Image (tube, helix red, strand yellow):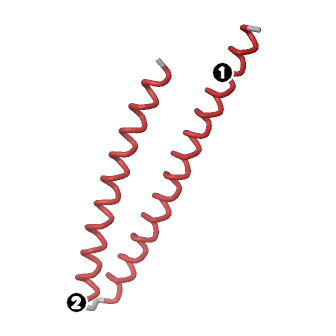
Amino acid sequence: MFSLIKSVLKSVELFLSLKNKKFYYDLYIEHREREDELVWQIEELRESGNSNDADRADLLRQRLDSERKQFKHLSTFYSKAGEESTD
């Protein structure tokens, strides 16, 4: 009976761990897509040569930097949380 309970708890732990990893993976994929879209928009605006477009590209560049910093922060938080749960 004890081994059955232990097995069920281990299964729940593995399920939650997998769910957590999938959440992070989805977050990573979403970040990459958003980053690629911003880079594409910046390149398009830079190619136009218009000064208004250059200003808009600068704003998008700031947003891209902000996105990268936020994702780095989330990644750091996630990796620290993952280390604690494996110990």
Q: Position of residue 51 (x, y in %)?
A: 22, 89
Q: 41 or 7: nearer the eye? A: 7
Q: Looking at this rendering, what residue extends furthest in the front direction?
A: 1
Image height of 71 relative to 36, above or below:
above
In the image: residue 13, left or right of residue 81: right
Callout 2, which amino acid?
Answer: Ser
Q: Residue at x 40, y 71 (%)?
A: 38
For disc 2, the marked residue is 51
Q: 6 or 44: nearer the eye? A: 6
Q: Pointer 1: residues within 10 angstroms few (<14), some, or many (20+)?
A: few
Image height of 35 relative to 20, above or below:
below
Q: Quadrant of residue 75?
A: top left
Image height of 72 relative to 59, above or below:
above
For disc 1, the marked residue is 9
**Disc 1 or disc 2, which is closer to the eye?**
1
Q: Residue at x 34, y 89 (%)?
A: 48
Q: Residue at x 42, y 63 (%)?
A: 35
The N terminus, quarter of image: top right
Q: Quadrant of residue 4?
A: top right
Callout 1, which amino acid?
Answer: Leu
